[in-house]
Each structure stands twice: as structure tokens, then as C-alpha cells.
Amino acid sequence: MFRGLLPRFWMVLLLLCPFVASAHNHDELDARVREAVHELYQTSPTARILGAKARGMLVFPRVFKAGYGIGGEFGEGVLLTDGRTTDYYNIASASVGFQLGIQRKSVVVLFMTDDALRHFRDSEGWKVGVDTSIAIVTVGIGGEIDTDTLQKPVIGFLFSNKGLMYNLTLEGSKISRVSR
């Protein structure tokens, strides 16, 4: 069973590697973060309102995902509090199942309460779906934000999809603080 998956795993890595170019310095990553937040606010006026109320904003301007039976995802980002960069993070995941393609997306996670932000910052590594639940809002797919979503302590936006891939989710993604 695993013999057939191993070649696919290496193919996914080869497909993903050219796209996963890490930011070489703080200024480059911070500029990408500003662009991503601007794009989100242009796409969704509700996101702008929620962003102004959020206690913290975790922004991954470029998250790359590739899959062919076995998939992988990676991106770098920052945590903004009071409009300033406070910490650097990465997001990564691996998956097995129906998937085919390459995708680039931006991810913004809003921490709407002090408790939600504190829980995130105090964690060693944060696994989405295990350590917390994120109410996901997909922008650009025609979905409306319902009032139940607006009441959640952690709200995530996935947008700017470059390429086609089935399965827009953050479930199983691991978010870790990195030293820079």
C-alpha cells in the first residue's frame, strides 16, 4: 500500500518546493503581510470591521499547497497586535486522500477576544481543529458571513486562491512560532 504513495510523496515535494520561497528578511515578509491585509479588506468590508475589533491578527500572505494523493502545505506569517508585528510563525500540514493540484492562498486569522489570543500565544504549537476551532470564512466564493460566525472567538479568512484545488480548509494545520 505505501509503495504506491512514496513516489507521489516525492512528486508533491518537487511540485511544492519551487513555490515555497521563504521571505529572506523581516521587511519582505512584513510587506507581504501588509499587501495581504489590504487585499482582504478590499475583498470584504466585513473583514475590515472585524479586523478593527480583533485583539490580534495572524497573517500568512502566501500559503502553498500541492497534492497528488499525498499533499503538503507551508507558509510563513506574522502575528499583529495593535497593528505591529509581535511574532513570526509558520503553518504546515500534510494530508493523504483525494487531492490533485497546486494552490496558493492567503490566510488571516482574527483573534476576537483576549482569551483566544492569550491561548494562542501561550501554546507551544497550535493545531487547528485540536487546540481550537476556527470559524472559516471563504472570500470570493460567494459565501455570506452568518451572524453565528461573527460571534466566534477565532475567525479565519482564506482568499486569493491562485490555482484550483479541492478542499479549502485549515483543519490539521500546525501553526508554530519561529525565531527570526
Image: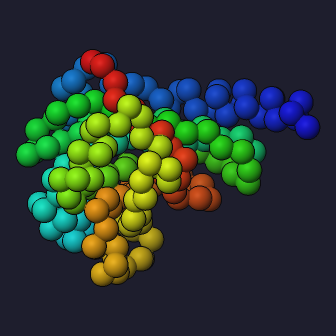
Please indicate whether residue 28 sits to the left or right of residue 137 in the image. Answer: left
Please indicate whether residue 16 sits to the left or right of residue 61 in the image. Answer: right
Q: Is residue 126 above or below residue 22?
A: below
| Residue drawn at (23%, 45%) of the image | 118
Find residue 121 and report its horizontal and vertical position in percent: 27, 38
Please indicate whether residue 20 sits to the left or right of residue 51 in the image. Answer: right
Figure quadrant of residue 53: bottom left
Residue at the left extreme of this rendering: 82
| Residue drawn at (81%, 29%) of the image | 7
Q: Is residue 22 above or below residue 73?
A: above
Find residue 87 and report its horizontal and vertical position in percent: 23, 31
Please indicate whether residue 119 sits to the left or right of residue 114 in the image. Answer: right
Tally the numbered discs: 0
Find residue 6 and report its horizontal and vertical position in percent: 80, 29
| Residue drawn at (42%, 53%) of the image | 132
Name the quadrant of the N terminus.
Answer: top right
Tell me if residue 109 can be seen: yes
Which one is nearer the viewer's eye here, 12 or 94? 94
Which one is nearer the viewer's eye here, 139 or 132? 132
| Residue drawn at (20%, 58%) of the image | 113
Figure quadrant of residue 145: bottom left
Tell me if residue 37 can be seen: no
Name the quadrant of the C terminus.
Answer: top left
Find residue 32 and report its horizontal and vertical position in percent: 26, 38
